[in-house]
Amino acid sequence: MAGKNLCSGCGLTFGSLGAFDMHRIGSYGEAIYKPGDTKRKSPIGQAPSTRRCMTLEEIQAAGMKQNDKGWWLTGQMGDSNPWANAEDEPVEANS
C-alpha cells in the first residue's frame, strides 16, 4: 500500500507497507511444545522474539533507497504507486 509508514521502533519513514515490512527482520518467536507432542496442539511456552529493525547499513545493502522526502523505498518500480506499470509512459499535460 502506498503512503507514509512510520516505524515507531527506529523512527524511519517508509513509502510503502512493503518497504516497511522489508526493514523488519527476525523471528516472531516460535511456540515451544512438550517433547513428544507430535500434534502440536498445546504450546507450553514461546521462544524469545528476535524481531528487529534493520540498521541503515542493512537497509541500503537490501537495495532500498530514499526518495526526495526522505522516505525509504524498496527500489522496485512502482514502490510508491502500487498501480504503476513498467509499460506506462508519462503523459504530458496540455497547456
Image: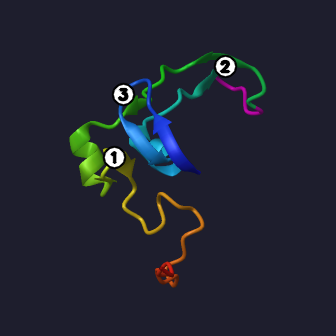
Q: What residue does disc 1 label?
A: 69
The spot of residue 84 in percent (x, y) is 54, 70
- How far apart are the two marked residues, 3 and 1, measured between alpha carbons? 14 Å
- How far apart are the two marked residues, 3 and 2, measured between alpha carbons? 39 Å
Identity of the residue furthest to the top in this view: 44
**Which amino acid, by three-letter code, is at mark 1?**
Lys
Q: Give the mark, 3 or 1, whose residue is nearer the N terminus.
A: 3
**Which amino acid, by three-letter code, is at mark 3?**
Gly
SS at mark 1 in the image: loop
Per the image, is 38 magenta?
yes
Q: Give the mark, 3 or 2, whose residue is nearer the N terminus.
A: 3
Q: Marks 1 and 2: which is nearer the front? A: 1
Q: Residue at x 30, y 58 (%)?
A: 63
Which label belongs to residue 34?
Answer: 2
The spot of residue 34 in percent (x, y) is 66, 19
The spot of residue 74 in percent (x, y) is 40, 56
Q: Are marks 3 and 2 in contact (CB under 8 Å)?
A: no
Which class describes the residues within 10 Å of circle 3: few (<14), some (14-19), or many (20+)?
few
Q: Marks 3 and 2: which is nearer the front? A: 3
Q: Marks 3 and 1: which is nearer the front? A: 1
Vertical order, 83 against 47 (above or below): below
Q: What residue does disc 3 label?
A: 11
Residue situated in front as seen by the camera: 92 or 16: 92
- How far apart are the two marked residues, 1 and 2, measured between alpha carbons? 50 Å
